Amino acid sequence: DEHHGPIGTWEEFEKYPWPKIENVSFEDLEKLAPLLPAGMKVTATLPGGVLENLIGLIGYEPLCYALMDDRDLVQAVVDKIGEGELSVYKVLCQMEHVGALWLNDDLGFKTQTMISPEDLRAFVFPWHKRLVEYAHAHGKRVMLHACGNLREVMDDLIDDVGIDAKHSYEDIIQPVAEFKRQYGARVAVLGGIDVDALTRFSEDEIRAYTRKVIEQCAPGGGWALGSGNSVANYI
C-alpha cells in the first residue's frame, strides 16, 4: 500500500514481529547441492531489498514524509532490515554450492530514483555495502538487480558499494549496449533484451533485435545474454 504501512510510529516499530533467522528454512537451497552437475553453482536472492522492504514497512507516501520529519525512525527500520538481510547472507555464504548472491533492490522508476540520491547514500547504500563486503570476504560475487533510472547513483553502486554485476535494463531508460559502453570496464553487465520488445515484437523482429544486441555487447566479454527484466507470464 503506497499510502500506509505497518510501521508509522515508534510504538509500532517496537511491536513489529521482526522475523528471526532461526525460524527461516533454507531446505530448498540445501536440496539443490547434490543435484548440481560438476562445476555448476546456484545463485540466491534476498527476500526483497533494503529499500523495497523499507517502502513496504512504512509505505511509500509516509516514507517521503518520514524522511523529512522522523529520520531517526527511518534509520531504525533500515537497520532492522539490514540486520535481517545480513543474517540471510551469513547463512548463504556458508553454502559451497552457492556461487553468487543477488542484491535485489528496485531503486528507481523511469526518470529517477525512488528517494533522493542523498537519502539512498544515507540510509540504503551503507547496508548494501556491508552485504557486499561480507559476501566478498567469503568468496561470493554479488549481482545487483535494480529497476529504474540510476544514472545519479551508478558510480556509488560500482565504486563504493562494490557490486560485481548489474541487471535490469529498459531501452526507454538506457539500452544495455549504451550501459556497457559507459560502465562495462568496471562492472559485469547482465541481460538487457528489453521486456517491452519481448512483449510486442514478432518472432522475426525479436530475433533481429536480439542479434543486434549480441553484436553490440558480446565483444570484449563481461556481458551475459538475457532479458532486461523478469519474463512476464503474458509473454
Image: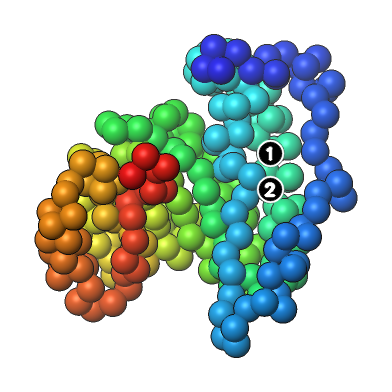
Which residue is rendered at x = 57% and y = 64% of the image? 43
Secondary structure at numbered mark 2? helix
| Extreme residue in the right direction | 22
Amino acid bearing label 1:
Ile
Q: Is residue 102 above or below residue 186?
A: above
Question: In which image quadrant can residue 75 be found?
Answer: top right
Which residue is rendered at x = 21% and y = 46% of the image? 197
For the residue carrying disc 1, how many other residues have a C-alpha within 10 Å: few (<14), some (14-19), or many (20+)? many
Which residue is rendered at x = 33% and y = 44% of the image? 235
Q: Position of residue 163 (x, y in %)?
A: 47, 60
Q: Is residue 99 above or below residue 154?
A: below
Secondary structure at numbered mark 1? helix
Reading the image, the residue beneath label 1 is 81
**Nearest the camera: 191 or 65?**
191
Which residue is rendered at x = 33% and y = 55% of the image? 227
State the CA–CA distance, disc 1 to disc 2.
6 Å
Reading the image, the residue beneath label 2 is 85
